Image (cartoon, helix red, strand yellow):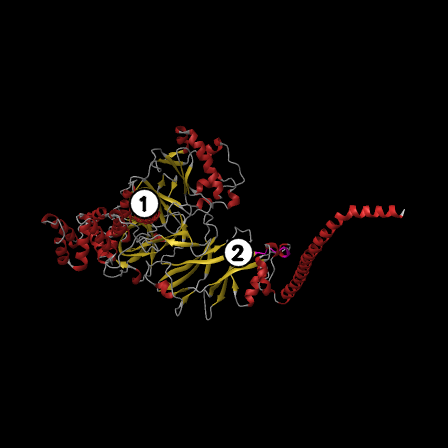
Amino acid sequence: MAKHSRKLTQKVDRINQPRTGAIQKRAKKFQKQPRWRSWLLSTLALTILLGSAGIIVASGWISILFILNPEQVSWLNEILPEWGQLPLSKSDRPQTLSAIQLSLSQKNRIAGETIYLDDQQQKSFLLPVFQKRANCQSNCQELIELRVYQRSKSLEFQLQREKYYNLVTQMSVTGLTESFVTAPFGETASDANNQEGKKQLSFTEVKAFEDSTLSPGFWFYLRGEHKQEDSSIVYGQIYYYNPGNSSLQQMLSWKNPNGQLPRWQQVTGSAAKELVIDQTVGLEPHLQVYQVKSGQLASNSLILEEINLQSVFEDFGYQKSLLLARNGMWSPALAWLISLQKNPQKPFPEAVQAQIDLIRLHSQLTKSQADKIWASPSQQVLTDLIDGRWEKALQIFTASSQNAQEIATLLKADRGRLWNRTAVALRLNPNRQSVLAWTYLMLALQRGEQRATSWLQEQPNINQKNLTYYQDLLAKLNYEVTTTHLSQIIGGVQQITVINDADWVLIPGTADLKITDNQVWYQVEVSAFHNHVSWLSSPFTNLNPPKTQSSQFWAKILGISTDPTIQIIVWLKNGEQQINPATIKAVQLRNGVLRLLAVGAAIPQTQNNSLQPKPLALTPAALEWVQPSPITVQELYQQNPQVVRVMLENVWRALQQSGDMPLSGAVPKFPEMQVKMGDWPVQLIDVTNDGNLDVVLTISGAAIESLNQSASIKGGNVEAQKRPRTLIFSNTGKVIYNDFSPKSQQALSAIAHLANDPSLTLLVENPHKYSLKRWSEANQRFE
């Protein structure tokens, strides 16, 4: 058994011997791997442990810093989402608008009117901050700061009932220097001005540009006003708020002598509008135009770039056009550029196209001025010369000696604006006769005839024939006025007792303002007059008398050089007219109101009488009364029944609207109205100048009383004491003139033909004056 057992053992050992060797090799291999893996796992565990501990410590430390000094953890807002932003300090915490205003008042600051930047959605707004100037009596608030607030996006404040805002940006404001504001006009509006050591002119107002088509962002301007002697200069700055980077940007400074504020206007035809600053003085246009361009210093920034007249490329025609434009000859410059544009082989660059649009904008102004009919020949000539209409201006000069005398005053007073134009025009075309004529006249008036003739003889192509032509022009200035037009003046008149000599300009032939015992003073407020060219109506805002020889100006333009007589017309109680002659002695023009001072015999009936027209003044040649024979309403019905039906219904409604008839009552049937109004007189006359007869119906107070069945309620005979009033109907029965309008205080006094005017005119009495009304075909009404 033992032997067998031993054999079995040996067999087993023999069988397992190779496996034991493999196990030993594998054991050695596995002994190396656990050491490397153990080291890796230990390192990873230690890293995680240290990292977790660091995060816990950092979180605790950040929490402590946030409690003790929140500003030290401001960098967290750069990585946190908007809804999780941290309020960093007490001053940076969101506030309500009332809290912001209270905080400013506690610092002696004044919160201005909020300007919302998002169409009243109240998500963001601009807040101007003011302070009071010391020792100030009026307009004491000055702008010192601009702030932009935005609705808080923090979840904590979004859930509040009130709206909370964060301050996103702010900018201090210092105003402009007085030297910049008072510098001569024509300089670039965006010139930088040194703020140090100079008197500052503050801003008093902040306004938004109300234009929804502007580029993304928000545009607004600051404004102030500087009074200088008897005039004032408006000045300011343009600002832009960029919502992309929440920044405020000052774009440019501006000033203006005519009170016009900067405006956005489509000038170049691009998608974006341009900023226009109008610095026009008088009739001389000066517009600065700025285009919105992308800035180079920062992404998403904008700049305002002015369109200038600097040369872009070499071309004779182009250079000539710029030369004309720089010297104020906008229309000739535009004509040249347009002719050059017709060449398709040489298209203009974008910058040149912008220059053309700038020149076109100025040309539109000069053309519109020259197209107007001016009361003064000198003003007409000035606008023509500014627009380059040399020949037309010369025609006005040669039209009469009195024109030449007045225009001579204009040429003497020129300080370079007309001379520069003639010099440039001659440089480009030295043979243009009309330009030579104007240059010769200016030289003769400013430097003497001998100097002007010497200059003229030096010009090319001058011979004895055309030299005589120019000298004949100059000779017109030495002629006396031998002829004049008949005076044609219409206006209201009142008797006055006290006058101030300093308020009036004496006409030629009047030594002083004195009257005899049987004379009185009459003051005539002119409603219209004829200036030998056309009728002019009040207000006379385009009249510009010269500072010298103004008495001759008035005598000529009013046509009273040879005969200063004017008629004073008064209506008597029985309706008759009483006419007394008076003599014009002096003239006054204030705020567009033209008055004449006349002397004549006293008219006892000039006291106020509400039942009669107010006194009227007119010259004998002014107008011709039109008084067609009347017919009755019944006779008109037989001729045109349909018109009378519509007309009588409109009459009744007009009386109801004016309060002369009860509003509650219905319009009677036509037969009833025909009975009551059939004998009323009407006049047929074409007042609309369309070839059809219109119907003029004048209704007396007694006629209205007969219609009113409740006269006893209204006080018996009150209606009979009212003045007659008029309705005018078209040939279809439509009301085209109405004295019965509610609260109307006008009354038609007469229908007349004005001298030199084929159409009919209504002479209408208003509470304080007379006015002339003509039918406007375009607007279908009397104007």
Number of marks = 2
Local crowd at mark 2 within 10 Å, few (<14), some, or many (≥20)?
many
Q: Is residue 488 visible?
A: no
User: Which residue appears farthest toward the front when viewing the image?
Assistant: 3
Question: Badge 1: few (under 14), some or many (20 or more) residues near its Cα, within 10 Å?
Answer: some
Report x, y in % for residue 3. 87, 47
What residue is drawn where x is 56% and y is 67%?
Answer: 106
Q: Which mark is residue 348?
A: 1
Q: Is residue 152 magenta?
A: yes
Q: Is residue 296 placed above or below 138 in the rendered structure? A: above
As rendered, which of 601 and 641 lies closer to the eye?
A: 641
Magenta includes 761?
no
Residue drawn at x 14%, y 53% is 456
Please tell me whether mark 1 sits on a helix, a strand or a loop. loop
**Can residue 147 be seen from the camera position used here?**
yes
Residue 578 percent across, percent down from the top left: 31, 48
- Find disc 2 in the rendering and name its residue: 125
Q: Is residue 683 above or below residue 93?
A: above
Alpha carbons under labels 2 and 1: distance apart: 43 Å
* Label whose residue precedes the other's in the sequence (2 or 1): 2
Q: Position of residue 595 (x, y in %)?
A: 32, 55
- Position above or below: 443 against 684: below
Residue 176 is marked as: none
Label 2 vs label 1, nearer the camera: 1
Amino acid marked by disc 1: Phe
Q: Splitting the image into 4 quarters, where does residue 694 fall?
A: top left
Residue in the image at 50% along x and 42% along y: 711
In front of the other: 205 or 747 = 205
Q: Which residues are magenta?
A: 151-156
Nearer-the-camera pick, 481 or 39 = 39
